Amino acid sequence: MDRRLTFGQKLAMGFAITTILATAMAAIAVYALNRVVASKDRVLTVNAQNLIDAARLQTAAARKAAAVRGYMLSGDPKYLEQETEARQLFLRTLEHMRPNLFTPEGKAMIRVVEDTEMEHQALVLKANEMRNANASNAAIAQFMRGEVIPVVERLYSRVDDFAAWEEKLLNDGRNASTAEADSAKKLVLAIGALVIVLAFLLAGFFTRLLSRQIGSAVQDVSSSSAELQSTATQQATGAREQATAMSEITMTINELLATSRQIAESAQRVASISSETAGAAAVGDKTVQRARESVVGIKQQVDLIVNHMLDLGRKSQQIGSIVDIINELAEQTNILAINATIEAAGAGDSGKRFAVVADEIRKLADRVGGSTKDIRTLIEEIRAAVNSTVMATEGGSKAVDAGTRAFSEVTNSLNQITLMLGTTTEAAREIELSTKQQTTAVEQVNGAVNNVSQVSKEAEASTAQALQTASQLATLSRDLSKLIRSQANGAK
Amino acid sequence: MNTVVSKLESRIEEMRRLFDESFAIVPHEQVAELQPMLAITLDAGRYAIPIREISGLAALTEKIVPVPSRVPELLGLTGVRGIVVPVFDLAKLLGLKSQREQVRWLVFCGERQSPIALAFETMERMFELPSTEKIVPQDGHGRYISASLREGVTLRGLISISALLERIKTRGASERRK
C-alpha cells in the first residue's frame, strides 16, 4: 500500500473496496433475483395462463356439449346461441393460447385439440341439421351416441391431456424457478461470505496499517505534546517573568516620569537661579575689583613686613655677636676668678676673704655664662623665627602676587561665568522644554508599557491556557495510544 | 617665643638680685673646710685637680711650638704673660690616650718664676669639696691618681700634681745627665 496516501484516502479506498464487493454482491443478487423472477414470471404468465386457458377450453367444451344436448333435447334456438358462444369462447381461448406455446409438444397438442374441435363442430352441425330436419330422437340419439359423444369425449380427453401437459410444465417451471432461486441464494450467500471475509481481511489490514501509522503519529503527537507542554511551561515562566519585568518597567517609568517632572522643575529653578547668579556675578566682579585693590595694599604691607623682619634678623645677628663677647668676658672672668682662687689658696689664711670674693665672682661668671647660653638659644630661636617669618612672609608675598593674578583670572572667570550663565539660562530653558516633551513622551511610553503589560498578562493567561491545552493533548494522546494498543492487541 | 623671653627676663631678674645680694651679705666664717677643685675631662674620663697644687689656669690662645726632646710627654713651648713655659701633655703623663689636637686649656704648676704647663682637653668648672667627705683611697690607678672622689653622682680621679711634677723633674734630670 502506498504510504503517501492519506488516511482519508486509505479509509476511502477500504470503503470503496468494501462498497465494490457489496455492489458486486448486490449485482449478482439482483441478477439472480431477476433470473428467479423471470422464471417465476414465465411460470406465472405462460404455464399458469396456459393452464387457465386449458381450464377455459374444458369449460367451453363442456358448455358447448351441454348446449348441443340442450338443443337436441329441446330444439330451443337459445341453445344454438349458447353453442355458438361456447365455440367462440373455445376458439378465442385457443387464439389466446397460441402465442404462449413454446414447446413443440404443446403446439402439437393444441393442434390436435383444434382438429378434434373442428371434427366435433362438423358433427354438431350435422346433428343440428338432423334436429332442424326433425329427425327422430332415436336417430339423433343414435347419432349422438355413435358419432358426437365419442368425439366430445376425445375432445375432452385432448383438452385434459393439454391441461395435464401444461400442469406438468407449470410444475417443471416452478421447480426450475425454485432451483434457480436456490442456486442464486447459494451464490449470494457465497459472495456474501466472500465479501465478509474480504471485509474482515481489509478491516484487519487497514486496522493494522492505520494502527501502526496512527500509533506512530500518536507517539509523535505525544512527544510533540510533551515538548509543547515543556515549551508552554517555559513560555508561562517567561510570560510571568515578562509580566514581572513589565511591572518593574512600569514602576521605573513612573519614577522616570516623576524624575522628569522634577528635572523640569529643577531646570526652571536653574534658569531662575542662573539669572540671579548672573546678577551676583556682576556684583562679584565689582567686589573682586575692590578686593584686588586691597590685595595690592596688602602686598605693600607684606613687603614692608619682610624688610622689617630682615632688619630684625640682622639685629639678632648683632645681638649674637654681643652675646659672644659677653660669653667670652664671662669665661675670662671665670678664669680670672679661678686664678684668684688659686692665688688666695696660695696666700694661706690671709687669702681666705679674697677667696670668698673670687668665688662670688666665679659664680657670677658662671651665671653670666649660663645666661649667655640661654640668650644665644633665644637669639637662635628668634633668628629661626625671623627666618621662618621672612620665608612665610615671602611666601605670603608670592601668595599675594598669585592672589592678584588669581583675582585677574577670577575677574575674567566671572566675565566668562556671566556669559556662560546666559548660555546656561538658555540651556536650562531648553532643558525645561525638552524635559516637558520628554515627560509627555514618557507618559506615552507609560501608556504603551501599560498596554504591553496588559498584553503580557494576557499572554501569560494564554500561555497558561496553552499549557493546559498541551496537558490535555498529552492526556488525549496517552488515551489514544492506549486505545490504539488495545485495538492492536484485539486485532492480534 | 614669649615663654623664652619671660624666662630670660626672670633669669635676668634673679641674676640681678643675686648680684646685689652678694654685696649685701656679711662675710662669715666657713663652717667646714672646703677644698677647691678644678673639674676637667681627659680621654672621656672625669678627673679633678686640687686648686692648692696649681698656680694658675689659662685658656690656650697661643700656639704651642714643638721642640726636640726625648721626653714624649713634652708638647713644646708657649708664651704666657711674657714667660716661656714648657707644655706637657697631661693625658700622656697619666698614661691615657693623647688628644693633642683637642688641647684647649693649660694649668700651671711648679715655681712661679719657671712654671710648667699641663695641657688638657676640657675644663668643666671649679667646685669645692668638703674636707669631711672626701676621698676614697685609690688602688691600681698609678701613683699620679692619688684617690677617687665623689661629686654628686660622678666619680672623679684626683690627680696628684705634686707627683707629676716630681716625675717631670726626675725625667728632666735623667735626660740632662744623658
Image: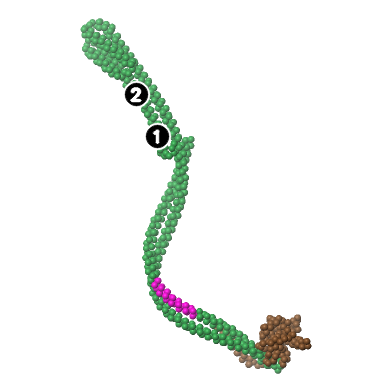
Amino acid under label 1? Ala
Taking B156 as reference, is A201 left or right? left
Q: Mark 1 sits on what residue?
A: A16
Q: Earlier in the sequence, mark 2 or mark 1?
A: 1
Q: What element carries label 1?
A: helix
Which class describes the residues within 10 Å of circle 2: few (<14), some (14-19), or many (20+)?
A: some
Residue at image coords 41%, 58%: A250
Residue at image coords 37%, 20%: A175
Which class describes the residues within 10 Å of circle 1: few (<14), some (14-19), or many (20+)?
A: some
- Specify the segment rendered in magenta: A396-421
Percent of width and height locating residue A386: 54, 83
Percent of width and height locating residue A255: 42, 62
Amino acid under label 2? Ala
Is residue B160 something that shows in the picture? no
Q: Mark 2 sits on what residue?
A: A38
Main SS of residues in magenta: helix
- For the residues labelled 2 and 1, the Cα–Cα distance comes to 31 Å
Q: How is colour applied across the structure in the image?
A: by chain
> In this view, which residue lies farthest toward the front?
B68
